[in-house]
Image (cartoon, rainbow, N blue to C red):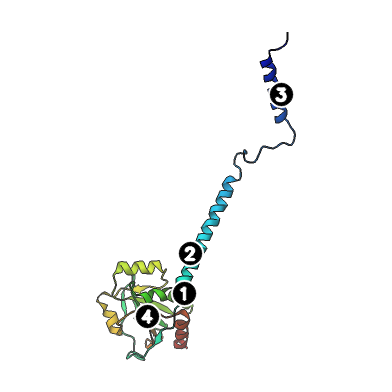
Amino acid sequence: MGRPRGDRRAAARLAVGRRTRDRPGQRPHPRAAPGGGGGVRRSVALTSIAVLVLVAGLALFLATRHPVTDATEAPSPLLGRLAPALAGRELGGGTFDLARERGHVVVVNFWASWCGPCRTEAPDLSSAAWRMRRRGVVVVGVVFNDTVAAASAFAHYYGSLYPSVVDPGGVIANRYGVTSPPTTFVISPAGRVAATLLGPVSSAQLEAVVARVAS
């Protein structure tokens, strides 16, 4: 008596399954393999998107940023005279005293967080400060009619590469005759005011004036 029909069908399916598993050279489908490339592809895609976002942001910044035009090099009653005293607490802690910088060219920049032209010149001023520091040039900012909180946020946002002195009551600004920012003074190694620049200064103009004063 033969096997029941159901048993014969089950045996046939079992034999086919064994032949399939034992077939030489057969590999599992990559999608079924554990740890396949799906995660890698997703990681690459996310990285590419992040790079595109950064590039687009940089392009937008460069396209909307107003170019810095040269400031006006103006006459001043301080020209040729010893620079007024400039000492005080820095935004990031510590103290600054102009008297300690004798023998160096010093750039003094009066600025405020609410000043539009100050925002325009901030990137140029920081890049110039970084380059000139290697030549012994000292750059210091003076916060003009502003709060410490707002000025600190401004300096952090623009990545300021030089210290800025707090000027409560505008005492330092009065000594230098500053009525509006940005105003920049270049002081010679002998401690005398050598140049006064009114308005936002470009890095090229500032470095040219500093080179002239240092020579």
Say if mark 4 contacts mark 1, CB within 8 Å.
no
Mark 2 residue element: helix
Amino acid type, label 3:
Ala
Report which residue position mark 2 lands on. 57
* Residue on which disc 4 sits: 108
Q: Earlier in the sequence, mark 2 or mark 4?
A: 2
Image position, residue 17 (x, y; %): 69, 27
Q: Toward the viewer: 25 or 164?
A: 25
Instruction: Say what amino acid the circle numbered 4 marks.
Output: Val
Measured in 3D between alpha carbons, the distance from the residue under mark 3 to the one under mark 2, in whole angstroms, is 62 Å
Amino acid type at image mark 2: Gly
Q: CA distance from mark 4 to mark 3?
A: 90 Å
3D distance between C-alphas at marks 4 and 1 = 15 Å
Q: Residues within 10 Å of mark 4 (few under 14, many from 20)?
A: many
Q: Amino acid at mark 1?
A: Ser
Between disc 2 and disc 4, the foreground one is: 2
Kindly give the residue lying farthest to the front in the view shown: 5
Specify few, some or many for label 1: CA neighbours under 10 Å numbering under 14, 14-19, or 20 or more.
some
Q: Nearer the viewer, mark 4 or mark 3?
A: 3
Residue at (72, 36) in percent of width and height:
26
Residue 15's label in the rendered image is: 3
Q: Secondary structure at mark 4?
A: strand
Residue 3, percent from left and from top: 70, 12
The quadrant of the rendering that contains the N terminus is top right
Q: Secondary structure at mark 3?
A: helix
Residue holding disc 1: 127
Q: Is residue 150 visible?
A: yes
Sequence-wise, which precedes: disc 3 or disc 1? 3
Label 2 Cα crowd, 10 Å radius (few <14 / some 14-19 / many 20+): few
Q: Quadrant of residue 209?
A: bottom left
Q: Earlier in the sequence, mark 3 or mark 2?
A: 3
Looking at marks 2 and 1 on the same chain, the residue that comes earlier in the sequence is marked by 2
